[in-house]
Amino acid sequence: MIFLFEQFAYSEKFLQSVLPLEKKGGNWDLPKGFVTKRKSGEFVLDGVGYLYNKSAKGTAKDSDDKIVFVLPKVFLEDGVRAFGKEVKGDANFTLENAPKDFLANLSMWVCSSIAQYQKLHPNDRAIESPNVHRFGSDAAAPTLIDVMNAMKLFYTENKNLFVFTAKNKHSGNNRIDWRRTVAHTQPFMQGDAPIYMELENKKKVFDLDDRLLVLYFSAMHYIEETFGFKMPHSEFYAPMRVNEFRRLLGHRGLVELSRIKHKYFADKFLKLYNIVKAFLEWGGNFSASDYSSEYLLTSKYNNVFEAMIDKLVGDDLPNGMKYLKDQKDGKIIDHLYKDRQLIFADEEQKIWFIGDSKYYSDGKKIEGSSIYKQFTYAKNIIQYNIGELLDNGNSFKGLLYRDELTEGYSVTPNFFIRGYLPNSDGDKESPQFREPYFRNDISEELIKNEEDSNSYQLIDDEGNPIGSNKGQSLWNLRNRHFENRLFDRDTLLLQVYNVNFLYVLKAYTSKRSSLRDEFKRDAREKFRKNFLNLLRDKYYFWAIYLPDWQKPDYAERLQDFVDRHFRALVGRVFQPAETPHCLILALERDVVDKSKEGDKDDYRAIRKIVDEAKCEVFYIWSHEIWEDEDLRKNCGWKAIEK
């Protein structure tokens, strides 16, 4: 097989030897724009996927060199290496020290993700797959990738069928057939009793179901031996030799198959019949002279990655709420899901978590437009919720964005998700190739929060720096209209997550829904926990109670307290739904520390207001304060005093 990489520079001569060419003109027999020429004279591939190049030189035995995979650029380290080995622009990429099927199986995951995306988004024109049809009893042949996936799935779902058929065929074979024994063998006499030394067993009539199963396992054996893909095996059915089976590809095999079609009535065997037929048709079609290539390619693999992450993380919105993602101003949110609010909320209080994905990482570079769009997504979500409240008198069920008492807004989490692959350790005996996610250590996180630092560089859509080359932190890039107002509607924070790309691929393409459920559970837990850690690192929190909070007039007195000091408190206090007797005060740590040094007066001014009202004050964390008895002991302002 030939392995190439998206956006890597190759020589024209090498690509001409591995990619299909038109018979006339010498142009690429591929979608327009898939192969582009740089000013330097080198060529790059603007896409990801699979193609079968029938025009490649070689015999039928060399058909594995006709299979070409273009892998995503996320696998490139610094743009020049992959899995610890240098990628060359004039040679096929191979991994001598990796398991034989490592690259092949990896490529299958990638192509399976494209195929699944295509089924869910058939109108996406970024997916190119001519001559491809989903197969049934009379449909035209699909791609090799489709047939292989169907074969594997059938084996996984019907293992007991193979065992039952084999046992049924061989049952009774060890019983002695006395009629044939007497007729065909010569006994010797011991007294008056004949002794038969050679016994003949009963032989059942050959079951035609077996022939179908032999063809099925022979096809998978042929795929494994010819193309290097790991395929299932059977302990009961010996496959045909590769050369013998190769002669059945196309018309000859289809004729043999048609002769036994009338023997099958069970749905499972009819399905297996169609799968075997599809593979034989594939072999026949690509022995024909009017086919030069087949391919399953996408010029926008970022769309596929976005769909994968959304399936693994996001919520399926009902039709009546689709506008939350496909927003009225034309912007489209990648990922949206409801989870527990951040500020001391019970399980009933939810808020939208908003994500944007990119399937490869540019290190510390972030498109400026992406940040501003992300903040706009959040503003729109907040406005839709408030609009529903104003128009209909109620907010979305279980979603509290604005607190009526303080007019504070709940914190809205925003995050970027970027695909990455662990760098190779460079060891030829590296266990990374045997680890499902290419990790050096199984304790390495599959989804990890990228540590904030003053090294992020804003770039435009073409990758050029915006402004000075001085690095910035995500904290400095936060959206705000006022200083030190966490609960203001325009204060929006952002985090970046790197997710193991192989973990995404495996979870998305897996037949086990439990792996996807595990991904969703772990990812959402990390997103919420890390955002709480961000709030803890950047803010001080206090719970404030007015005196005599048990008395009946407490709500009225609390309203009067907020109204009288509204200008000082707005955007800094919030009333949690589950603890209506208290106010949560949040102040930035930097501002509070400067206030104690005399540079700012926010902290001292608010502290004076609270002390004069003789409020009871608890210094708290942003985590579930009411579930941790030890935190209740940490009372008063003194927790941050020097």
Image: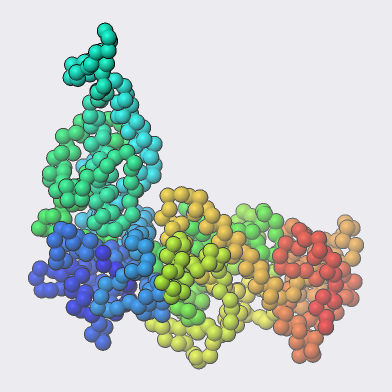
327 vs 588: above or below: above
Where is residue 526 drawn, in percent x and y?
A: 59, 64
Residue at 19% in and 20% down: 185
Quarter of the rendering containing residue 384 = bottom right
| Visible residue check, residue 93 | yes
Residue at 47% in and 53% down: 319
| Closer to the camera in the image, 578 or 300 | 300
| Visible residue check, residue 334 | no
Q: Tell me the colour scheme of the image.
A: rainbow
Where is residue 405 drawn, in percent x and y?
A: 74, 65
264 vs 386: above or below: above
| Closer to the camera in the image, 487 or 442 | 442
Where is residue 567 drawn, in percent x and y?
A: 75, 77
Residue at 50% in and 92% down: 468
Quarter of the rendering containing residue 236 = top left
Judged left or right of residue 534, residue 560 is right
Instruction: Tally the marks.
Output: 0
- State the quadrant of the N terminus: bottom left
Residue at 89% in and 76% down: 612
- State the quadrant of the C terminus: bottom right
Judged left or right of residue 267, residue 256 is left
Q: Seen from this angle, which residue lies furthest front?
A: 191
Judged left or right of residue 443, residue 281 is left
